[in-house]
Structures are given as structure tokens and as C-alpha cells.
Image (tube, helix red, strand yellow):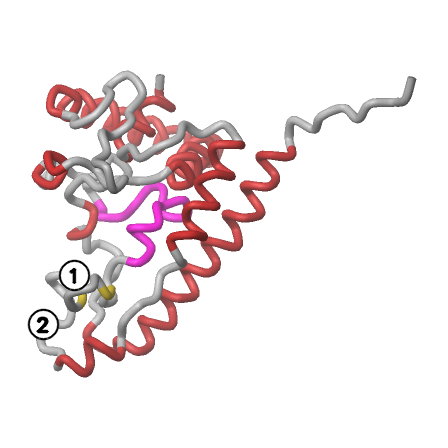
Amino acid sequence: MGDHPIPDSHQPQANFQSQDSAFVALIDGAFADAAKRSGPHLLCKAGCAQCCVGVFAIGSADALRLNQGLVALAHQDPERAVRVRERAATSWARLAPRFPGNTATGALELDPSGDPVDAFEDFANHEPCPALDPEHGTCDLYAWRPQTCRVFGPPIADGEGYGVCELCFQSASPQEVAQAVITPPSEERSRTLDEAAVAAGAAPGATIVAFVLQAEAA
């Protein structure tokens, strides 16, 4: 009988880490390039938490990265990690009764196109992210933040024009807005990364930050 290779249980995690590192570098590079082209119209800075209020959907890769970030923070700064966990638990307790999805798994209900159902559009638009340090207006999980957070600020083409932070580009001309547009990674690449995250143990489907961080706390 021939020898049979022993499956490497660490391979899926290593595969995700490799893909995620490249993905994050790509996004952060795209943001840095857009920031240069934005000039004085991009006002993002530490302490501005406009983009940290309002719940948004995240995928499996974002969820796994946040989970890993909270574990890392618990080693680096245990007290700060506890505060993140407490804010997440408090936030989820507020949100769960109206959550448009499965409160046991955290999975958002999706429409036939794969987007969150319409009820999510008006869900928790004034809820601060539990990763936000309310005292300093900074993100306690900044290095592990989701893709949406990494591209917020510069203009993003949305098919009908450009989506722009309401605090930025107020005095910019249409040409200045157009020339500062950020190009996020393709949907195919995001989907491939989500698949790698699921293979590494993340739950499939879309969820929200508060559920991920309170689940890690539990």
C-alpha cells in the first residue's frame, strides 16, 4: 500500500492570508493613488468618524480579517480589545431585534441579485461601528478594517455618477471629482477572496461588523 499524504489543516488559512495580504495591498495602493489625485478635496484624517456611523454589509473575507484583528488586539492591548468586544455586544443587542437576516448565524437576507434585501437600506444608519473608539474618533481595528472602509473618501463610480463622502469634494469641479476616482479590486477578485475565507473557516454570505465582533467575544 502506498503512503497517503496527510492533509495540511493550516493550508486554507495560509492560502487566505496570502491572498488577503495581496488584496489589502492592492486596495491600499489604489487609495493612496486616488488620495494624491484628490489633492485638498480629500479631508480624511484621524478623528473624522463620519464614515464610521451607519451599518453596512461585509463579506466573509472582511469578517475573517476582523476576527483575526480582534484576536491580535487581545494580545497587543487586552484592555482595548475588551472595550471593542463590549461595544460590539451592546451594539448587537440593539440591532438584533430589527436585523434583516438570521440572528443566529448573522447572515443577512439577500434578494435574487445577491444584494441585501431592501429593508437593509434603512437599517441602523445611525449606529456607530463597534470598532470605533468614541473618545478619540479612531478605529481600534484599523489595520484589519473591511474593504468598504479602505476605499471610502475618494469618488467611486456607481454607474450613475460618483459616490463621494459628503464631507469631501464640496468645492471640487466635476472634472476634479472624475480625475480623483478610486478603482477598487474587481468583484471577481473580492469573490475569490471570500471563497478562500470560507475555506479557512469563515461563515459564507454577508453579515455586519457588530455580529462578527460580538460573536468573537462570545
| Residue name at image x 47 percent, y 54 percent | 23
Q: Position of residue 215 (x, y in %)?
A: 34, 22
The picture quadrant where one finds residue 114 is: top left
Q: Which is more toward the observer, 122 or 70?
A: 122
Q: Which is more toward the observer, 213 or 196?
A: 196
Say which amino acid is labelled 2: Gln
| Residue name at image x 24 percent, y 64 percent | 156
The picture quadrant where one finds residue 96 is: top left
What label does residue 165 carry, if any?
1
**Looking at the image, which residue sits at the far right?**
1
Q: Position of residue 158 (x, y in %)?
A: 21, 62
**In terms of sequence position, does the residue under pointer 1 or pointer 2 come before the other?**
1
Relative horizontal placement of residue 28, taking residue 155 as reference (left or right): right
Q: Which is more toward the observer, 69 or 65?
A: 65
Q: Which residue is mark 2?
A: 170
Q: Is residue 133 shown to the viewer in this render?
A: no
Part of the protein shown in magenta: 136-151
Q: Give the class, few, some or many, for how many residues have Cα within 10 Å of label 2's Cα (few <14, many ≥20).
A: few
| Residue name at image x 20 percent, y 42 percent | 135
